[in-house]
Amino acid sequence: GRAGYSAVADFLATVGRGELNTRQLQALFREPAPQTGEPAAPALFQHKARTSHGGSGILVVGVDKLLTVPAKCCKPAPPDAIVGFVTRGRGVTIHRANCSNLATMDAERLIAAQWGQADGGAFEVDIEVDAVDRTGLLRDVSDTLARERINVVAANTGSRDTSARMRFTVEVNDLDQLSRVLGLLERVPGVTGAVRR
């Protein structure tokens, strides 16, 4: 292949080990000037974004058939603006573009990414519900989530004096569904706020 890489995985491993700098990457992605009389050689990396491996619904610009994993720190979901981080041996971790952890990461290992066509998969997001504590509050919040067919992956609840804070990790199809659920949670008697974390 182009630049001596036989497979995309070999290329990504090289990037992950930090053996290529930004200038070298740009040179690889730059199309060579066409020579007269000869057809241009097919490029290893297409500039058009294509769906990554596994039907994850995430497009990594320039690379096809690539393992992408949503970051646990910010839990991106469509249509969040996203960016990829090339890991050492684990493919590309997808972060929300405003994730605070990106500031501490090696900028040369960041790669453009965007959401592709929805594949019907669910995305984990964290939500926080604040309320005036009362008997039956958790039941009412849980009933609201169940009515909307929201799967709760994790829950953490606590109360102090007369206030309660509930944190949930839930699965949603997209941010429209999340917004609708947060609105419904805010209507539960005693709830003072419901937000994505």
Image (tube, rainbow, N blue to C red):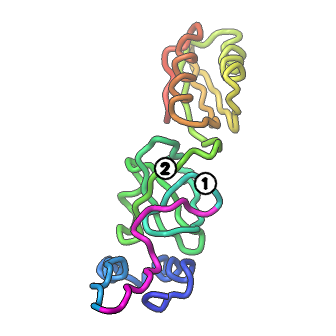
Residue at 58% of width from left, 68% of height from top? 65
Q: Is residue 47 magenta?
A: yes
Residue 62 lies, in percent from the top left, at 44, 68
Range of magenta residues: 37-53
From the viewer's perspective, tell me whether residue 117 is left or right of residue 141.
Answer: left
Residue 41 lies, in percent from the top left, at 41, 86
Outermost residue on the front side: it is: 37
> Mark 1 is on which residue type?
Ser
Residue at 55% of width from left, 36% of height from top? 174
> Mark 2 is on which residue type?
Trp
Density class for disc 1 (Cα within 10 Å; few <14, some 14-19, many ≥20) is: many
Label 2 sits on residue: 115
Q: Are marks 2 and 1 in contact (CB under 8 Å)?
A: no
Report the number of discs: 2
Which numbered dot is residue 56? 1
Residue 77 lies, in percent from the top left, at 52, 43
